Image (cartoon, grey):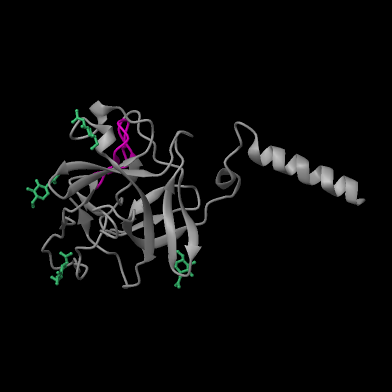
Amino acid sequence: MSSLTFFSSLILLFSVLTSANPVPLKQLVKPKPSGPFTMVAVHSTSPIHLKPVNAQRNHFYIGNATQTFCPQQPDVTCPIPGNTTVLQTTSRGYCNLDVEVPGGQHVYVAANGALAYTVPNSNIVPKGAHSRSFALDRTSGTRSSFTYSGTGKASGWLACPVAAAVYQIFANVELEDQNVPQKNVSACIALDALTTNYTLPGAAAWQYT
Ligand SMILES: *[C@@H]1O[C@H](CO)[C@@H](O)[C@H](O)[C@H]1NC(C)=O
Ligand SMILES: *[C@@H]1O[C@H](CO)[C@@H](O)[C@H](O)[C@H]1NC(C)=O
Ligand SMILES: *[C@@H]1O[C@H](CO)[C@@H](O)[C@H](O)[C@H]1NC(C)=O
Ligand SMILES: *[C@@H]1O[C@H](CO)[C@@H](O)[C@H](O)[C@H]1NC(C)=O
């Protein structure tokens, strides 16, 4: 290749990468299955920095504890400690909670932008929800960022205030004030969802409630 051709190729590549509506690179790469993993919020100088993201009442929160259930039955071995929120993603861009309950629990982004999960024994996500386009973008070592590119308009996550020191997780998808608990999107805090491999054997919980 002559240096001129090489240079033109570089310019072409550069213009493709910087065109007004570039195809997001991560959509060109097939997501790898990953997990199980836990998540903490990253936004230095904010009150949510390095706080865990917890599953409770079919949504995800910072500042509220994980809520799980395990039936006290002879044939059931309840995971220990069973109070950690653990997710995994699939090679097709789906995301599940790391549970034992038959049928599993599926993670989705609800029509209002809230990160949510199905009740046990049901694969049904509500109308208008997106249950694909989840991925882990590897940063370093055991750490990655949990991402969602569902509607093409998503850019990261928001933690929206619910009560004192309690925040609910939303995909940053052009939310309107009415979508969030305190009806004020401006009060939400942008975050990266930094993940860490969960290394205990077995599922993390029987089910999340
Ligand atoms: C963390 O988990 C991913 C798969 O989910 C794996 O590829 C990676 O090697 C793990 N890292 C460590 C340090 O175990
Ligand atoms: C968060 O936890 C507090 C205290 O345990 C509880 O009163 C509140 O209802 C919880 N909030 C949500 C949204 O679950
Ligand atoms: C989880 O359960 C263990 C054992 O019961 C307890 O020591 C730990 O504090 C709990 N963690 C959280 C975050 O509630
Ligand atoms: C919404 O939140 C922003 C940022 O915290 C704040 O400045 C503004 O006053 C709030 N608006 C209302 C109506 O509460």
Asked if 130 appears above or below 121 in the picture, the reply is above
- Horizontal side of 121 relative to 134 (left or right) equals left
Q: Residue at 36% of width from left, 62% of height from top?
A: 37
- Residue 141: tell me if it is visible: yes
Principal SS element in the magenta part? Answer: loop
Q: Residue at 12% of width from left, 47% of height from top?
A: 164
Image-quadrant location for residue 67: bottom left
Q: Nearer the viewer, residue 124 or 38?
A: 38
Q: Residue at 19% of width from left, 63% of height from top?
A: 83
Asked if 51 appears above or below 142 in the picture, the reply is above
Asked if 15 appears above or below 147 in the picture, the reply is above
x and y percent of residue 97 in the render?
31, 54
x and y percent of residue 172 in the render?
37, 38
Q: Nearer the viewer, residue 168 or 131?
A: 168
- Horizontal side of 181 relative to 140 (left or right) equals left
Q: Residue at 77% of width from left, 46% of height from top?
A: 10
Q: Is residue 147 magenta?
A: no
Q: Start and end of the magenta stretch?
A: 109-126
- Horizontal side of 147 relative to 5 (left or right) equals left
x and y percent of residue 133 in the render?
46, 43
Image-quadrant location for residue 115: top left
Asked if 85 appears above or below 133 in the picture, the reply is below
x and y percent of residue 22 in the render?
61, 36
Q: Nearer the viewer, residue 51 or 202?
A: 51
Q: Quadrant of ligand 3?
A: bottom left
